[in-house]
Image (cartoon, rainbow, N blue to C red):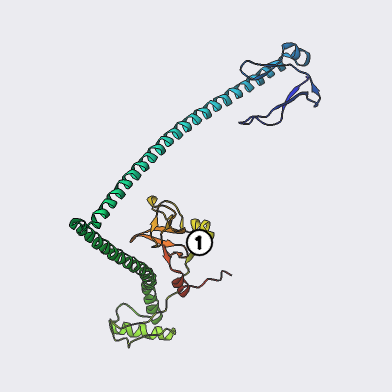
Amino acid sequence: MQKIRIVFDGPPGPEAGRFVEVETAEGKSIKFGEWEEGEDGFWYLNISCHHFSEMASDSEITKWDEVAKAIEDERDTWEKRANQLKDNYNKLFDDFGKLQADLTAAEDKVRELEGENKAWQRSAKRVDLLAAGHDPLTIELRSRAEKAEADNATLREQVERLKCGKLFADNDASTLRERLRVVEDALNNISTVYDACKNAAGIERTHTEGALWNSIEQAIKQAGEPVKGQGKGKGEDMKFKKKPVVIEAVQLLWSTWNEMCDHAGVGKLSDGKPEGTYVNPNNEAVSGSGDGRIALAIPTLEGVMIGVEGDWIIKGIKGELYPCKPDIFEATYEKVDEN
């Protein structure tokens, strides 16, 4: 049973392969069928029955009919996709038309505002002319305007002082949060240290309070820990050394942004995740590019905290995130040697 192969230079797809030749199963090129250009712009390979009778049996002709139908179905599929792409193009074209209309309306509004600005400028010139003639009303209005400008300057100065105060307050708050975290870690370990001391001293719950503290003091001294006070009872001060806590931290920089995304799980604030943003010179998150510095808005129980470019974003022992200023970080932490 002989076979023929229709050769294309690529598989079916949006950029379908082009026809190369018709050949036998052994790869020999043969003339098979006749090409015809249709009125619809497509080219058709017409294969008459006598071609099949010369090369194939009835079963083979049936198989080639199935192949031809599959090719026809594939062509119909791509025609449908082409029509869909045309529809999408038309929709995009309509959307572009709407955007163009919005732009035209915005330009008209700008021209309207420019006209109003020119009208105000003409009014200002008239006021200046009246002032040159020592008009009492104009002089009074000018005096009020100067006073308002002075008050405005005073308010701007106060705003700048408040902004500076807020910046210092943010830094102090960051420091206090770090110290609070250290204290909380120490408090979380106190009960463990207390139980360890009791076990080391062999204390039972039936001992009196004074004897309990005396025994704890002796046990800690034997363990080499410093103790303040004589162990006379409740209320005496005791010194403890904080257990080393390993934290994860990544410095917020352009070069570490991909690492930061993995470290902090960056997403959307609306989903309760940290979100990337920009800040202005006052370290306030803005919707635009701000002054070009990147930042990270971090949702916490106290509200949204802003870590600016250069800050270290720390992940606590419970997975909580908080920013830390570089100088505080360098004074508090040192890198762990993983080896």
Residue depicted at 42% across the width and 79% down the height: 241
Q: On the rendered structure, is 259 left or right of 99?
A: right
Which residue has dot 1 on it?
253
What count of labels does the image hold?
1
- Give the structural element (helix, strand or loop) at label 1: loop
Q: In the image, is residue 95 above or below residue 186?
A: above
Please indicate, yes or no, whether residue 208 appears anywhere in the rendered image.
no
Task: Give the vertical position of 219 relative to 321 (above or below).
Answer: below
The answer to whether 105 is drawn above or below residue 249 in the figure is above
Q: Is residue 302 left or right of residue 49?
A: left
Is residue 36 shown to the viewer in this render? yes
* Residue 70 place in picture, x, y as percent: 63, 22
Task: Give me the residue at 43% from left, 67% from top.
Answer: 324
Residue 153: give x, y in percent of width and height. Answer: 29, 64
Instruction: Choose between 199 and 255: the one closer to the eye.
Output: 255
Q: Is residue 79 left or right of residue 99?
A: right
Say which of 198 and 217 sits in front.
217
Could you tell me which quadrant the N terminus lies in? top right
Residue 273 percent coordinates (x, y):
41, 54
Amino acid identity at mark 1: Leu
How far across and down, in percent of the image, does residue 227 sit? 38, 85
* Rendered residue at 27%/61% (across/down): 149
**Camera-side residue: 119 or 11?**
119
Label 1 CA crowd tier, 10 Å (few <14, some 14–19, many 20+): some
**Near-viewer residue (191 or 165):** 165
User: Quadrant of the rendered structure where residue 206 is?
Assistant: bottom left
Q: From the viewer's perspective, is 4 left or right of 196?
A: right
